[in-house]
Image: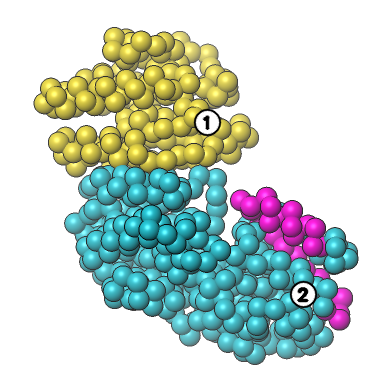
Amino acid sequence: MKVIVAAGIRSFDLDEVERLGSLLAAAIGEQGHDVELMQLEADAGHPARLIDQATAIRSLRVDRGDRLVAVGWPSHLLWHDHKIVLLTQRNICGGWHGSLPAPDRDLLLAQEVQAFTEARRCFALSEIAAASAGRVCDRTFELLALPVSIERPHAPPLRDPGTKLDWRGTVSILLS
Amino acid sequence: MRVAIVSSFMPFVGGGARSIVTWLHTMMARHGIDVETYNLPFSDDPRTIVDEMIAYRLLDVASKADRMIAIRPPCHILRHPHKMVWFIHHIRSFYDLWGTAYSPVNDNAQGRALRRSIVEMDDTGLNEAKEIFTNSMVVTERLRRFNGVKSRVLYPPVFEPERFTCEAYGDSIVYICRVEHHKRQHLLVEAMAHTSTPVRLTICGASTDDGYVQDLKRRVAALGVSDRVDLNIYWIEEEKKVALLSTCLAAAYLPVDEDSYGYPSLEAHHAKKAVITCTDSGGTLELINDGDNGFVVEPDPRALAGAMDRLYLDRAMARRMGQRGPERMNEIGVTWEHVVGAFTR
């Protein structure tokens, strides 16, 4: 299977979403799939430019690959016939960039809901992320545990400590 | 210094443009530079190309980088306060290939308007750049002619050239690159029917054009050369490429008016192998001198067959031409030190 992993990254700042994107791409490759890692800048230079950034991402074309796994804002805004969203807490509906003016935030939120709606499947890495998305978007966000613990500076690690999954199991669920 | 390298790509399609990005990143990191790479999707579908280019214009990348190096188009239209461009080719169907069979857009009012929009966007992005380098004199001349901008040639080296060795001068001419119509593998297949020696042909590379691949297979069968032609239509591993180049007689690289000398030519030269190319192959002519480090012949099967036979019959000449390869690369300054220095001065 040809799989594109798209991850939102912060310029010159290796954060948890960038790490997760890289780990996931490597794990998918190790399962014998053909994988491409694509990185998109999450932190547009200024919050006021987030609408430009989101609009630009929506206008990019990714018409290859059997699956596109989108990890973290703004990658889930990409169009793809078989998009799988892997929701971290970096998203508009979770309150990310909450300092935006209300009209801008509403526009971005509507765009994000649209992007979730068109996805084939949506996973969330925490109950908080699933609940925040579920409040604005009428679709199911399945909880997915990670086989590794990815530390975050001001939040619990990205992992359900009770998981018995390894990467093979995680990849299998994601791509099924 | 923080440097961001930005390029466009088509997922799951390899080629020189992908390699140049990966290798530049690695070499900059080895020189102690804090470097980050962004590969952005781009389809160059005429139906969506303007939307995609506007998206690039709106997009923020490398916001914390001191310098941004834009490589494959249309990355040069991205905005950055210190934008440098290593321009490796235009979106050629709107430039030098306009009005040819290689352009999917009709030369009518709508097509011309689309072409004008693309040229104007390119002009805007290029004129913002602090410096523009190209990968060949061919591309520098196209930038001058079509966009009115000045640029300097910065020849792209291959990665870890010491991987390439020369063990022998065997019986086979190898052609290793993407298998596409404009790379003209079919000319070599046809040439095989005109050879008078047992010289062999090995073609390796992935393709996005099934029709062309089927046509190549049909030609091989119809010409009765299947016992001397080896078609490997897939992306070969680096180790296999190194092994093939190490033992082949010589290499071929015959694109139509190529932007640069092409990595296949450089890799062959690192393996001390002569390169056969054509008089209309573009950038390869900046590297290959006829009768010196290879043959430059008309894009005609009989002419190609003549060059193949000469190399087969005169192994001492094949060796002498091949050994000129590394000297020729030094003459035109193909080194990573030169490249990294140009972007960080």
Instruction: From the image, tell me which residue sits under label 2.
Output: B191
Query: Which amino acid lies under the numbered mark 1 shown in the image of this protein?
Result: Arg
Q: For this view, does B275 lie left or right of residue A107?
A: right
Q: Colour of chain B?
A: cyan
Residue at image coords 65%, 59%:
B179
Residue B302, how many percent across, how many down?
Answer: 76, 81
Q: Element at badge 1?
A: strand
Instruction: From the image, tell me which residue sits under label 1.
Output: A67
**Chain bearing mark 2:** B
Residue B310, how many percent across, how many down?
Answer: 77, 86
Residue at image coords 68%, 56%:
B212
Q: Quadrant of residue B225?
A: bottom right
Q: Are marks 2 and 1 on the same chain?
A: no
Q: Which chain is yellow?
A: A
Residue at image coords 63%, 62%:
B181
Q: For this view, does B78 lie left or right of residue B320?
A: left
Residue A2, how many percent across, how many down?
Answer: 57, 36
Q: How is this picture coloured?
A: by chain
Q: Quadrant of residue B223?
A: bottom right
What segment carries the magenta color? B195-220
In front of the other: A121 or A60: A60
Query: Does the magenta segment cover residue B33?
Result: no
